[in-house]
Image: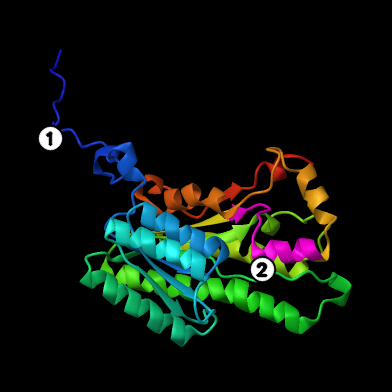
Amino acid sequence: MAPSAVPENTTAVAPESIQNPAVARTGDLFSLGNRTVVITGGGRGLGIVLAAAVLEAGGDVACLDLLPTPSAEEWATVQKLASARGLQATYMQCDITNEELTKDALEKIAAEGLKRNMPLRGAITCAGIQQMVPALDYPIDGWRKMLDVNVIGTFIPAKHCARIFKEQNTPGSIVMIASMSGQIANRGLTCTAYNSSKAAVHQMCRSVAQEWGQYGIRVNTLSAGYIRTAMTDALLKEKPEVEETWMRGALLGRLGVPEDFKAPTVYMLADGSGWMTGTDLRVDGGHCASA
């Protein structure tokens, strides 16, 4: 019998996992150290809470918002966190529907990050508006504004952050704050324009993830359920009976709060989610699990 053939190269190829940056201590996989994260809509509410989360995870944070100044009490907490950790938290007023202004702001943030050896590697597009109007009466100008802020205002910063990641030759992660309302119709609410805008964000995420993956850029959405913020409080003030409807779908017995989204967002920004892109993480207290 002829001897079996022996391959010329008997050196084993390293498993894919060994070549993957996600192979690290579990704690390190949730770190945002050595990077800057930009947050649109970072002047109050969910955005400013996520700014604190970035700092707690070890990253610098840069917040953009249409507000001239951020919420004073919350921003003081953010600055205290940054100082205690030797990190940096900055704030700039910016209209994220204006491409030139947004581009300039992001380029300044990226340049500052490189100076500090904290390159821009993450973005959270959190800016958005809500409006409750019956579809039969919805003014087209209101529709256009909703799409301009929630859709165009998501795409512009995502586009220019992706350009920066590519030019820096650094991996990057973009988290687009979407909503379960982009996947369902909300009982008790008449928010057709808002729901449509969030559905558009879901599809935008999938589309740009497909385009930008070749550059090491990941894009995912976080779909929030019903949370208590200034925006939802305004809706409930207008229609207080809606809270009872919401609570019937609250499998964990409560509505959400902005702090419920700190850990999920950090995960999507960090290396631990390095094989996750073009997908949605829904954090809704189980609301969509029941009919």
Q: Secondary structure at mark 1?
A: loop
198 vs 268, left or right, is: right
Residue 207 point in image, percent of width and height: 52, 63
Q: Is residue 117 visible?
A: yes
Q: Secondary structure at mark 2?
A: helix
| Residue at the (71%, 39%) spot, across then down | 253
Label 1: how many Cα within 10 Å (few below 14, some 14–19, many 20+): few
Which label lies toward us, 2 or 1?
2
Residue type marked 1? Asn
Say which quarter of the image contains residue 100: bottom left
CA gap, disc 2 and disc 1: 55 Å
Residue type marked 2? Ser
| Residue at the (51%, 82%) spot, across then down | 68
Q: Is residue 207 visible?
A: no
Of 254 and 41, nearer the camera is 254
Whether 6 is drawn above or below 51: the answer is: above
Residue 138 point in image, percent of width and height: 82, 76
| Residue at the (65%, 75%) spot, across then down | 147
Q: Which mark is residue 197?
A: 2
Say which quarter of the image contains residue 291: top right
Label 2: how many Cα within 10 Å (few below 14, some 14–19, many 20+): many
Disc 1 designates what residue? 9
Of 143 and 208, nearer the camera is 143
How did the renderer colour the structure? rainbow
Which region shows up in magenta? 223-237
Whether 159 is drawn above or below 34: the answer is: below
Residue at the top extreme, as displayed: 1
Residue 93 in magenta?
no
